[in-house]
Image (spheres, helix red, strand yellow):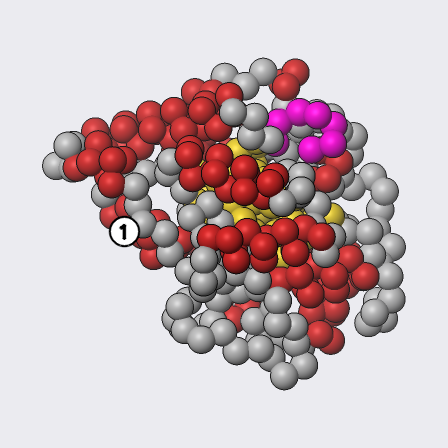
């Protein structure tokens, strides 16, 4: 594909935009590119197990500084070709020129991938280090959204931050950055992980108050061990809610009890979000299917209310967005 030429994409491939517009709920799962052969086997085992749930889409993350670029592209291509799933490719601007970004968009188009999640990305090595623009690249996520939009008929998602991005100077500024991404052409958003429904609801209210109605899909990561709490703070840059942490501290000496509570809390959180009108749930899996599957199955979501469209699925049912303040 020539750089800059609008991509021609197969009409039969569904987009997240189509799925949400169908009026149902979206349930989706997030994976990351493995570093070892054993990790790859675990990834594909999880993908095949979750495929039976007929999720609305699955997403594949992109390493800091583009460190997993080729693995991400390869996994997305294989999902598109070898499964019934609709893949969403994470796409970052770190260490990439505009020419390289356009080339990557072309690779996705050639694989029949129409869904891209545009996040600015983390600096390599230290997610909280100073963000340095590539001399021939883009500076803000909204520019990345426009670049993808100009390349063809892609469906573009962006990140949203219930607590606020660590680099944003204030919640108001963070909300404005998000609205700018939506006005640049984003079709929907997926939040950073969070553990308290109120954080999501406040974000949605702030965005609505600015006249923006872009669908915001909440992202949930079930807590299956105590170390997950510290890991969530590292990945999200947001403090873990103390009242939720206190529940886990009560059973901290019993790993099985921690896991049971994590599934229970995840299901409670998802039910509250759905009752409050969230357009669906996006689950972080860490390439394992069991916890997310258990939470999803506790929701007892009937197929009649799930996102449905026409495409590669007969009827789709149902998954750390750091570095994307702007």
Q: Residue at 52% of width from left, 25% of height from top?
A: 276
Residue 4 located within the stretch drawn in magenta = no
Q: Which residues are magenta?
A: 20-26
Q: Is residue 41 visible?
A: no
Give the residue furthest to the bottom.
135
x, y percentage for residue 61?
A: 53, 55
Viewport quadrant of the N terminus: bottom right
Left or right, 217 with reference to 284? right
Q: Is residue 96 visible?
A: yes
Q: Dot 1 corresponds to which residue? A: 230
- Picture mark count: 1
Q: Quadrant of residue 317?
A: top right
Left or right, 18 with reference to 128? right
Q: Is residue 55 above or below residue 234?
A: above
Q: Is residue 6 above or below residue 312?
A: below
Q: Residue at 41% of width from left, 42% of height from top?
A: 194
Check disc 1: other Cα within 10 Å, few if <14, some if 14-19, many if 20+: few
Q: Residue at 71% of width from left, 33% of height from top?
A: 19
x, y percentage for residue 101?
A: 69, 69
Q: Say which of 120 and 142 sits in front.
A: 142
Q: SS for tag 1?
A: helix
Q: Residue at 57% of width from left, 62% of height from top?
A: 326
Q: Is residue 145 above or below residue 54?
A: below
x, y percentage for residue 275?
A: 51, 21
x, y percentage for residue 113?
A: 73, 50
Q: Say which of 64 and 135 sits in front.
A: 135
């Amino acid at each position: 594909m020539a750089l800059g030429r609008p991509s021609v994409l197969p009409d039969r491939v569904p987009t997240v935009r189509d799925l949400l517009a169908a009026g149902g709920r979206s349930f989706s799962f997030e994976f990351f590119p493995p570093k070892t052969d054993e990790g790859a086997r675990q990834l594909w085992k999880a993908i095949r197990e979750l495929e039976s749930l007929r999720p609305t889409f699955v997403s594949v993350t992109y390493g800091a500084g583009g460190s997993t670029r080729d693995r991400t592209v390869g996994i997305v291509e294989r999902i598109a070709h070898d499964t019934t799933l609709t893949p969403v490719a994470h796409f970052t601007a770190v260490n990439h020129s505009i020419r390289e970004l356009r080339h990557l968009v072309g690779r996705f188009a050639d694989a029949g991938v129409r869904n891209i999640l545009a996040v600015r990305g983390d600096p390599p090595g230290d997610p909280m280090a100073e963000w340095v623009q590539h001399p021939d690249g883009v500076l803000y996520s909204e520019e990345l959204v426009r670049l993808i939009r100009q390349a063809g008929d892609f469906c573009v998602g962006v990140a949203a931050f219930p607590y606020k991005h660590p680099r944003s100077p204030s919640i108001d500024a963070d909300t404005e950055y998000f609205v700018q991404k939506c006005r640049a052409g984003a079709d929907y958003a997926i939040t950073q992980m969070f553990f308290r429904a109120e954080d999501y609801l406040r974000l949605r209210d702030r965005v609505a108050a600015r006249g923006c109605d872009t669908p915001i899909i909440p992202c949930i990561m079930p807590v299956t061990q105590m170390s997950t709490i510290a890991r969530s703070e590292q990945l999200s840059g947001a403090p873990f809610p103390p009242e939720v942490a206190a529940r886990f501290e009560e059973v901290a000496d019993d790993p099985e009890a921690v896991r049971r509570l994590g599934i229970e809390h995840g299901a409670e959180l998802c039910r509250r979000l759905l009752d409050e009108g969230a357009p669906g749930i996006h689950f972080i899996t860490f390439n394992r299917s069991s916890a997310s599957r258990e939470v999803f199955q506790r929701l007892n979501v009937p197929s009649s209310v799930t996102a449905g469209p026409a495409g590669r699925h007969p009827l789709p049912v149902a998954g750390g967005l750091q570095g994307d303040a702007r």
